[in-house]
């Protein structure tokens, strides 16, 4: 089985009707680039930078971050590497963290934390920018939800760029910056994000959590965490459609992208970029190679019009058969 899969590693990722589909890798540690390249990924779609905080109580400095980001950017040899800025919560033990969040999922986390700690944020942006001179780096912002946060973030990026220009340190002047779409408000106010950013990446893990009000780490409600909930499907289809019409690249980097049972449904919605753990990539690719988009569109539309969960599951089985 594994040997069979490895045979499609170097095959172009496209459907039977010739539609190209980009498959990218999610990584959490710089050491994982080997697996990412092995899987045949066309780049890193999500590099979760929080690993820099593992088992320590101080902040990683600019040099340490620069080393880590450069390792990945260089290791991917010119393929794009999307580096997500810290998705830290107030529950994490940051040095100098005096804030205790009543509800970490709704509290001072991710971009909110970065904007509240401008010195930390600038250090990270400078490190990413410097790494961008070693290959192709892009910046991804977690949990953006408002226009104010987008403006603040873009301003901070400009401050970081100017400081590097002043010091004559090289970086990619045209570095692309995108945002996670993982808060329902961001999905609903998509225009705002598309106007100001270069690309979008849908975080289904959090998007489902916040849409359905299901804590993603609470086992007592895990059975209610449903990627096929009609509200979730409607949001996903809408994001992909609206971004597609505006020619803004959109990917999914949540767990849903790496689960081959959803591959056809997402293709049918128009998704052309998937980011997942390297170990999942070839299984999803096999699904893509065997899919014919014109033949799945009608059933996808039918699923999107269906509100009964059991019917949706049955239609999905049919779509995948
Ligand atoms: C997500 O929310 O879907 C996502 C990809 O990010 P994380 O799982 O790191 O929150
Ligand atoms: Mg998330």
Image (cartoon, rainbow, N blue to C red):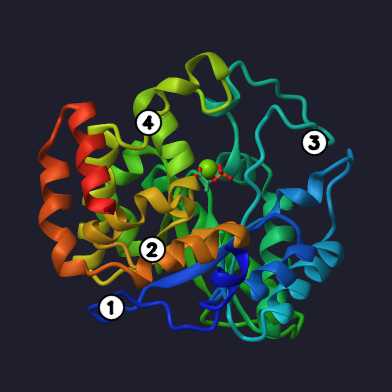
* Residue hosting label 1: 19
Of 27 and 133, which appears nearest the observer? 27
How many C-alpha atoms fall within 10 Å of the one at disc 4: few (<14), some, or many (≥20)?
some
From the viewer's perspective, is residue 231 above or below residue 250?
above
CA distance for labels 3 and 4: 32 Å
> What's the residue at 69%, 58% (across, down)?
122
Of 84 and 231, which appears nearest the observer? 231
How many C-alpha atoms fall within 10 Å of the one at disc 2: few (<14), some, or many (≥20)?
some
> What's the residue at 47%, 83% (across, down)?
11
CA distance for labels 1 and 2: 13 Å
Residue 295 visible within the image: yes
Whichever of callouts 3 and 4 sits on the residue coming sooner in the sequence is 3
- Helix, strand or loop for disc 3: loop
CA distance for labels 4 and 2: 21 Å
Whether the residues at callouts 3 and 4 have beta carbons within 8 Å, the answer is no
**Quadrant of the rendering where the N terminus is positioned:** bottom right
Whether the residues at callouts 3 and 1 have beta carbons within 8 Å, the answer is no
> What's the residue at 11%, 45% (across, down)?
302
- Helix, strand or loop for disc 2: helix
Whether the residues at callouts 3 and 2 have beta carbons within 8 Å, the answer is no
- Helix, strand or loop for disc 1: loop
Q: Which mark is residue 94?
A: 3
- Helix, strand or loop for disc 4: loop
Mark 1 within 8 Å of ligand 1, using the beta carbon: no
* Residue hosting label 4: 226
Whichever of callouts 1 and 2 sits on the residue coming sooner in the sequence is 1
Report whether 114 appears left or right of 191. right
* Residue hosting label 2: 287
Mark 4 within 8 Å of ligand 1, using the beta carbon: no
From the viewer's perspective, is residue 49 above or below residue 161?
above
- How many numbered discs sit on the rendered protein? 4
């Amino acid at each position: 089985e594994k040997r069979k899969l490895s045979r499609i590693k170097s095959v172009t990722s496209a459907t039977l009707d010739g539609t190209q589909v980009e498959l990218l890798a999610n990584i959490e540690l710089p050491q994982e680039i080997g697996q990412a390249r092995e899987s045949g990924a066309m780049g890193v779609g999500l590099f979760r930078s929080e690993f820099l905080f593992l088992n320590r109580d101080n902040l990683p400095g600019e040099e340490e971050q620069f080393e880590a980001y450069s390792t990945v950017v260089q290791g991917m040899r010119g393929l794009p590497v999307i580096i997500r800025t810290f998705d830290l919560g107030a529950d994490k033990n940051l040095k100098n963290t005096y804030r205790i969040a009543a509800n970490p999922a709704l509290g001072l986390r991710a971009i909110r934390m970065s904007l509240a700690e401008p010195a930390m944020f600038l250090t990270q942006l400078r490190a990413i920018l410097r790494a961008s001179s070693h290959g192709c780096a892009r910046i991804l912002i977690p949990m953006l939800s408002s226009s104010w946060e987008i403006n603040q973030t873009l301003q901070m990026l400009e401050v970081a760029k100017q400081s590097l220009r002043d010091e004559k340190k090289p970086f990619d002047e045209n570095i692309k910056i995108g945002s996670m779409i993982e808060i329902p408000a961001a999905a609903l106010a998509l225009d705002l994000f598309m106007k100001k950013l270069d690309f979008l990446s849908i975080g289904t893990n959090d998007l489902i959590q916040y849409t359905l009000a299901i804590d993603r780490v609470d086992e007592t409600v895990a059975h209610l965490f449903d990627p096929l909930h009609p509200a979730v499907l409607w949001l996903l289809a809408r994001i992909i459609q609206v971004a597609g019409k505006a020619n803004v690249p959109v990917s999914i980097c949540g767990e849903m992208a790496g689960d081959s049972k959803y591959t056809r449904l997402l293709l049918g919605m128009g998704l052309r970029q998937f980011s997942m753990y390297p170990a999942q990539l070839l299984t999803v690719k096999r699904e893509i190679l065997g899919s014919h988009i014109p033949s799945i569109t009608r059933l996808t539309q039918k699923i999107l019009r269906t509100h009964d969960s059991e019917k949706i599951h049955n239609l999905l089985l049919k779509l995948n058969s």
